[in-house]
Amino acid sequence: GEAYYLQLDSHHLFTRAWDVACVDTLAWLSTVSPKPLLTSYVRDYPENVTDAEALLREPPWRMTTAHWMKPFSGLTPKKIQYIPAPIENHIMHAVRGDPQPTAFFSAHFVFVRAAWLREVPYDPLMYFDGEEDSIGLRSWTSGYDLYYPTTHIVFHRYHRSGSKKHWDD
């Protein structure tokens, strides 16, 4: 039994003491929520950057919505497209680094107490498209409060030209 669970996409660049930041943030959130969960689309980093410290001056990102997107991978229902976006200045000035509530779950970055894995298991019949909606709703109805960090913990390499993607398998 591990105390915590971390889930990421591949191709990440971590800040110094990222693990301490995650544990401390979850501990602080536990004073306002019995079941906090950190989740977000984190900021992109350029291909040539190897030190996260060089990116810390950039505003962090959060997960938000864009518009109805066309069906993906042959699926017929429409769905909202989730996108990463910089956290707006007025939010950053008001919150002083405190994580903020979010309605959106991102499978891209998750940090939570490990009990979440038993309480809100992944649906084995869902892969990639729809699992974020499902697990976000099931987390919330299981008593979890979702938050996005307003400080950098990790950066993600979104664009990797020429690399094979899992949906191409």
Image (spheres, rainbow, N blue to C red):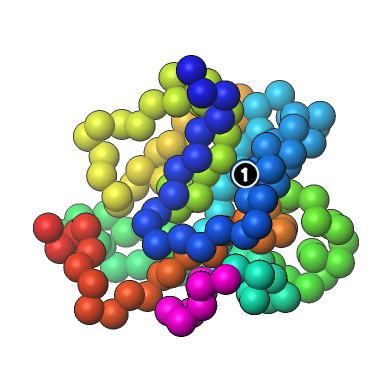
Q: Crowding at label 1, few (<14), some or many (≥20) Cα neighbours within 10 Å?
A: some
- Locate residue 11: give its quadrant: bottom left
**Percent position (x, y) of residue 30?**
75, 29
- Locate residue 42: give its quadrant: bottom right
Residue 147 visible in the shown view? no
Residue 55 falls within the magenta-colored stretch: no
Query: What amino acid is labelled 1 in the image?
Result: Asp
Q: Which residue is drawn at 39% across and 26% down?
A: 121
Residue 49 falls within the magenta-colored stretch: yes
Is 18 on the left-hand or right-hand side of 6?
Answer: right
Above or below — where is 46 with respect to 149? below
Above or below — where is 40 with respect to 91? above
Instruction: Give whichever of 66, 96 is nearer the camera.
Output: 96
Above or below — where is 162 with respect to 63? below
- The residue that mark 1 highlights is 19
Is 51 on the left-hand or right-hand side of 71?
Answer: right
